[in-house]
Image (cartoon, helix red, strand yellow):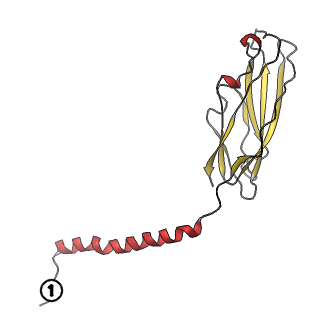
Amino acid sequence: MEHQTPASHRSRLRPVLRRPARLLALLLVARLAPCVLSEPDVLSWAGNFGSINLPALDTRDAVSTGSATETLILDGDAELSADNGAAARLTGPGGDVLSTEYQLTFDGDGGSDTGAATVDFTPYDSFLASPVLIAHVLGDDAVQVTLHVRAQNFAGQLANAGAYSATQTLTASWVGP
């Protein structure tokens, strides 16, 4: 007479038999992992943005613009965010402020060249409230980032004469390949 294993015993044996196969697969993956390591991720600015010197506002309705460009070196996608605090607003004598807006442009669009779409002029306190994604294109490991600033008097107001200054901080964060 042939010995038969009851169904209740068979179901207990199946998980035990599968475990060695899973363990072996995990061990193989762990052994191969060191072979696929690559160079560290690259994300750095080539330097600091230069100062942006705006022409004087010589009439109540005048608009003054300027820009500075810096290179971002990267080998994967990145995000740019900005400081939206009071330091980013043009402030002058006696605490007077000007309407301050920022814009970003790139030498690539993220399609055929590393870059992103233009970020239109936005008030300083909401500029890049959502970070902009810079898409990396293989073989193009640098993008020219241009920060534009636009200043003007608020409607119906005239700010005090004098020097105005602001500091805008752009932060690049790694997203991945």
In the image, 27 versus 9, the foreground residue is 27
Q: Please report the residue visible at 81 percent of the width from the left and 35 percent of the height from the top.
A: 50
* Rendering coords of residue 32 (x, y %): 52, 71
Expressed as whole percent of the image width and height from the top left, the position of residue 154 reads 74, 14
Element at badge 1? loop
Q: Quadrant of the N terminus?
A: bottom left
Q: Is residue 155 above or below residue 63?
A: above
Q: What's under tag 1, amino acid-wise?
A: His
Position of 55 relative to 47 (above/below):
above
Between residues 96 and 109, which one lies in front from this camera angle? 96
Q: Position of residue 128 (x, y in %)?
A: 65, 33
Q: Is residue 101 above or below residue 57?
A: below
Q: Is residue 50 left or right of residue 86?
A: right
Of 133 and 90, which appears nearest the observer? 90
Q: Name which residue lies at 53% across and 67% down.
A: 33
Q: In which quarter of the view is residue 147 placed?
A: top right
Q: Which residue is mark 1?
A: 3
Q: Is residue 26 left or right of residue 171?
A: left
Snapshot quadrant of residue 65: top right
